[in-house]
Image (tube, rainbow, N blue to C red):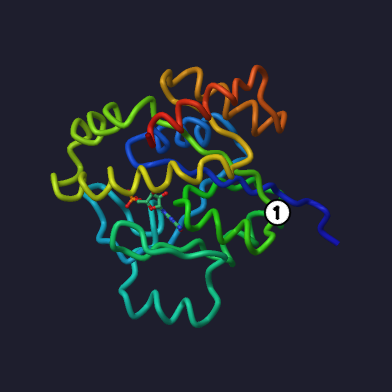
Amino acid sequence: MNSKIGQLFVISAPSGAGKSSLIQKIINNFENIELSISATTRSPREGEVDGKHYFFVTENEFNSMKEDDAFIEYALVHNYQYGTLRKYIDEKLSKGINVICDIDVQGFKLIQRDGIDHTSIFIIPPSIEELEKRLLKRGLDSENVIGTRLKNAKEEIKYAEEFNFRVLNDNFDQAYKEIVNIIINGKLIKNKDKIKIKILRDMLS
Ligand code: 5GP
């Protein structure tokens, strides 16, 4: 029997909160942690590679994968379908590899609902204004798309309190250290969760 079982980490954040850079640094620095590669109906952005960043599929392909129960969760995010591949996750975990799923809040809710063993982390942006600035600076999306992403950000923030841990990304190095602590020790030293929850509630008021 294979007794090696990896751990599943679910990390969500509104786009522009710095989630991708934080996750990338973790993947680069830890040998035994990999990022789950999802399937999506979104078109590749410049520089994105099929099978590395996502498995880029058509609507038809995605829908038949849904019928085949290929996903542990799937959701419509910013008008495109995204899903976490069951086979991909099972293979990694059974080899003792830890996996990070960078998914939206809807996906997190499904994983939580289905009782899949995981640790969840929500990354809090410093403020809605800062989020907007970051999205504009990143230059990846049109003004229209940024508007949708900001609206969705407020929706996502509403669910932040349901995650196991919250990490405030107002300082990249500090946020990175906090995530490493959760991954290695399963907890946060000086969590300051009350302050984080106040920041979240202020963003919604
Ligand atoms: P992007 O298009 O910028 O790569 O990702 C947009 C959003 O989709 C991000 O918030 C990301 O976390 C989310 N996402 C990526 N893959 C999945 C997935 O497999 N499932 C769900 N539910 N969300 C995903």
> Toward the viewer: 107 or 35?
107
Q: Is residue 185 left or right of residue 27?
A: right
Residue 77 quadrant: bottom left
Residue 1 quadrant: bottom right
The residue positioned 46% from the left and 63% from the top of the image is 83
The residue positioned 51% from the left and 38% from the top of the image is 122
The residue positioned 81% from the left and 58% from the top of the image is 2
Locate residue 100, reporting x and y percent: 55, 46
Q: Return the residue at label 1.
A: 117
Q: Is residue 59 above or below residue 46?
A: below
Q: Is residue 123 left or right of residue 205?
A: right
Residue 201 quadrant: top left
- Seen from this angle, which residue lies furthest front? 205
> Toward the viewer: 100 or 150?
150
The residue positioned 45% from the left and 35% from the top of the image is 24
Local packing at callout 1 (Cα closer than 10 Å; few below 14, some 14-19, many 20+) is: few
Amino acid type, callout 1:
Asp
Q: Is residue 171 left or right of residue 73?
A: left
Locate residue 8, reporting x and y percent: 64, 49
Could you tell me which secondary element the residue under label 1 belongs to? loop
Locate residue 118, reporting x and y percent: 66, 49
> Toward the viewer: 21 or 142?
142
Q: Is residue 27 above or below residue 38?
A: above
Q: Is residue 185 left or right of residue 172?
A: right
- Seen from this angle, which residue lies furthest left? 143
Q: Quadrant of the C terminus?
A: top left
User: How many callouts does the rendering have?
Assistant: 1
